Image (cartoon, helix red, strand yellow):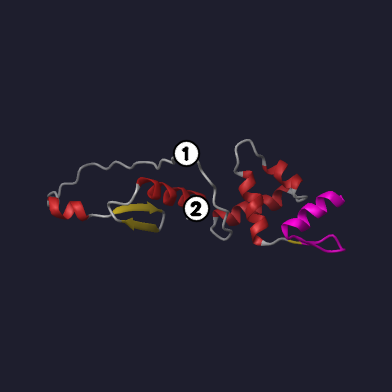
């Protein structure tokens, strides 16, 4: 018991004599992020943090609703975004001059991000990854 409590206090969790604990948002976010790692289970992570799986599930719901911000995930390889292909529109094509100035538009739910057309692909991938990590 002491080893786990010292683990929690080292993370910044306030552990009271009554057994109650006050969880800072960054610790909740860290626990939720651990459940998203390959091979991790909610039950396994909950046991590590000495909480009920239902509590961790509630924290995951907060993250899904955008009320709990997860830590950024470091990636060593490119991340690809889904490509949406639309049928050709019936309107006249834009002039070449205007098309060349059109921004790169990333749309995720109600969030729209416009980038310069010469934005590096790595930067676009970082933005898409960040949007995936923090659902709208």
Q: Considering the numbered disc 2 on the image, is that residue within a helix, a strand or a loop? A: loop
Q: Nearer the viewer, residue 41 or 86?
A: 41
Whole-percent x, y for residue 67 in the image: 57, 61
Q: Residue furthest top?
A: 39
Q: Nearer the viewer, residue 57 or 28?
A: 28
- Residue at label 1? 77
Whole-percent x, y for residue 96 in the image: 13, 50
Whole-percent x, y for residue 133 in the image: 51, 50
Rendered residue at 60%/53% (across/down): 61
Across the whole image, how many numbered discs are drawn on residues?
2
- Residue at label 2? 135
The answer to whether 43 appears left or right of 20 in the picture is left
Checking the image for residue 44, the label placed there is none
Mark in the foreground, 1 or 2: 1
Give the spatial CA distance, label 1 vs label 2.
21 Å
The answer to whether 9 appears left or right of 72 in the picture is right
Rendered residue at 32%/56% (across/down): 115
Rendered residue at 20%/43% (across/down): 88
Whole-percent x, y for residue 71 in the image: 58, 53
Q: Considering the numbered disc 1 on the image, is that residue within a helix, a strand or a loop? A: loop
Rendered residue at 36%/46% (across/down): 121
Q: Earlier in the sequence, mark 1 or mark 2?
A: 1
Question: Are there few (<14), some (14-19), or many (20+) residues within 10 Å of tag 1?
Answer: few
Q: Are marks 1 and 2 in contact (CB under 8 Å)?
A: no
Q: Which residues are magenta?
A: 1-21
Q: Nearer the viewer, residue 74 or 59?
A: 74
Magenta-colored stretch includes residue 26: no
Question: Are there few (<14), some (14-19), or many (20+) residues within 10 Å of tag 2?
Answer: few
């Amino acid at each position: 018991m002491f080893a786990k409590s010292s683990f929690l206090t080292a993370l910044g969790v306030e552990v009271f004599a009554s057994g109650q604990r006050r969880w800072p948002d960054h610790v909740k976010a860290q626990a939720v992020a651990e459940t998203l790692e390959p091979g991790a289970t909610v039950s396994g992570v909950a046991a590590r943090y000495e909480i009920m799986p239902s509590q961790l599930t509630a924290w995951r719901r907060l993250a899904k609703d955008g009320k709990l911000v997860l830590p950024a995930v470091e990636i060593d390889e490119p991340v690809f975004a889904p490509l949406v292909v639309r049928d050709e529109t019936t309107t006249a094509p834009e002039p070449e001059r205007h098309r060349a100035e059109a921004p790169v538009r990333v749309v995720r739910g109600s969030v729209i991000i416009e980038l310069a057309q010469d934005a590096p692909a790595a930067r676009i991938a970082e933005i898409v990854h960040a949007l995936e990590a923090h659902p709208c």
